[in-house]
Image: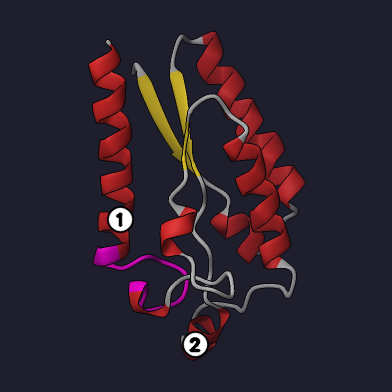
Amino acid sequence: PEVLFIMAGVNDYRANILGSESVENLAALREKCERNGIKAVFLTPTPLNPAQIQQVKFIDPPPEDWQEHQRFICDWIRGQENFIDVNEKLTDDEGNLIYLLSVDGLHPDAEGKRIIGEAVAAWLDKYLNLQ
């Protein structure tokens, strides 16, 4: 592919994996893309909504410091040459996934996915117009 969109990290910080470890993995993906002539475009990972997650019995609650690790990943992504910040549009005032954009506090619903899709489409429009 010419372009690869990479959105990763949410399951890492949900499962108590350090943001620094997630960034190491993302950097490895970026380097592999560069070696193969592929433009890596990173999307900021979505936030969580711990209160919603607690209502769902099959998802373990996130660690207390999940936002710290999410911020670490988002900051790294925002420092990349090609990135799309979807986090801003999905986050409430407390830094959680907006309640109305998810049924389980982890996965964006159709409206959340529309927001992500529109952000990707806008990036693609801009990219294709530069070609």
Q: Quadrant of residue 24?
A: top right
- Quadrant of the frame with the C terminus: top left
Left or right placement of residue 96 versus residue 2 in this view: right
Q: Residues within 10 Å of mark 1 (few under 14, many from 20)?
A: some
Residue 106 in magenta stretch: yes
Crowding at dot 2, Cα within 10 Å, few <14 / some 14-19 / many 20+, comes out as: few
Amino acid tagged 1: Ile
Residue tagged by mark 2?
Answer: 57
Query: For this view, does 48 lie left or right of residue 66?
Result: left
Q: Nearer the viewer, mark 2 or mark 1?
A: 1
Q: Which residue appears at 33% of the width and 51% of the height?
A: 116
Secondary element at image label 1: helix
Residue drawn at x 64%, y 73% as measured from the top left: 62
Residue 38 placement: quadrant: top left
Q: Residue at x 41, y 59 (%)?
A: 89
Percent across and percent down for residue 127 are 31, 22
In screen coordinates, is 104 left or right of 127?
right
Type of amino acid at the residue the image marks with label 2: Lys
* Image mark count: 2
Identify which residue is drawn at 55% across, 10% down.
Answer: 35
Depth check, front residue: 79 or 59: 79
Is the stretch drawn in magenta largely helix, strand or loop?
Answer: loop
Is 85 drawn above or below residue 68 in the view shown? above
| SS for callout 2 | loop
Identify the residue position indicated by label 1 in the image.
115
Which region is colored magenta? 101-111
